[in-house]
Image (cartoon, helix red, strand yellow):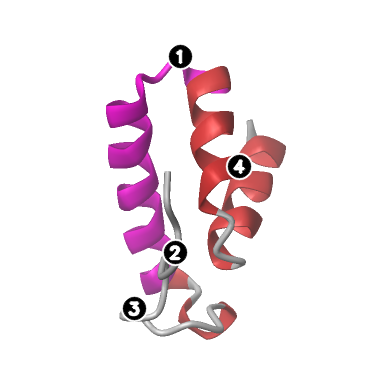
């Protein structure tokens, strides 16, 4: 499971939201709403533990993302 979270975390840090949601739906059986909630929790966690890895501000993260 560590490799899975590593891949998810890399996508989150890079702002690749759609792949994260698809992985979460596939690997955890999440509904889209559950995947969004899981994503949000992981995003907040990563902002705390790896703040320097993000190249976009909180305000800029997710801009121009349309699902």
Q: Looking at the image, is 55 positioned above or below residue 64?
A: below
Binning the other alpha carbons within 10 Å of mark 4 as few (below 14), some (14 to 19) or many (20 upward) gives some
Q: Which residue position holds label 2? A: 46
Q: Which residue position holds label 1? A: 29
Helix, strand or loop status at disc 1: loop
Earlier in the chain: of badge 1 and badge 3, it is 1
Q: Looking at the image, is 28 positioned above or below residue 51?
A: above
Task: Assess whether mark 3 and mark 1 are in contact (beta carbons under 8 angstroms).
Answer: no
Q: CA distance from mark 4 to mark 3?
A: 19 Å
Q: Magenta residues, as a range?
A: 27-48
Is residue 42 found inside the magenta-colored segment of the image? yes
Q: Looking at the image, is 26 positioned above or below residue 39?
A: above
Helix, strand or loop status at disc 3: loop
Earlier in the chain: of badge 4 and badge 3, it is 4
Front-most of residues 52 and 64 = 64
Helix, strand or loop status at disc 2: helix
For the point 34% across and 78% down, the residue is 58
Give the image quarter of residue 13: bottom right
Q: CA distance from mark 1 to mark 2?
A: 22 Å
Binning the other alpha carbons within 10 Å of mark 2 as few (below 14), some (14 to 19) or many (20 upward) gives some
Q: Residue 61's x, y, as percent?
A: 42, 72
Binning the other alpha carbons within 10 Å of mark 1 as few (below 14), some (14 to 19) or many (20 upward) gives few
Task: Assess whether mark 3 and mark 4 are in contact (beta carbons under 8 angstroms).
Answer: no
Helix, strand or loop status at disc 4: helix
For the point 31% across and 80% down, the residue is 59
Compared across the picture, whether 32 is left or right of 11 comes to left
Q: Residue 67's x, y, as percent?
A: 42, 43
Q: Which residue position holds label 3? A: 58
For the point 28% across and 29% down, the residue is 33
Query: Which label belongs to residue 19?
Result: 4
């Amino acid at each position: 499971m560590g490799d899975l979270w590593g891949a998810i975390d890399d996508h989150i840090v890079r702002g690749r939201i759609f792949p994260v949601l698809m992985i979460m739906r596939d690997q955890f059986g999440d509904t889209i709403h559950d995947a969004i909630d899981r994503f949000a929790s992981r995003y907040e966690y990563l902002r705390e533990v790896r703040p320097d890895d993000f190249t976009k501000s909180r305000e800029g993260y997710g801009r121009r993302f349309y699902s």
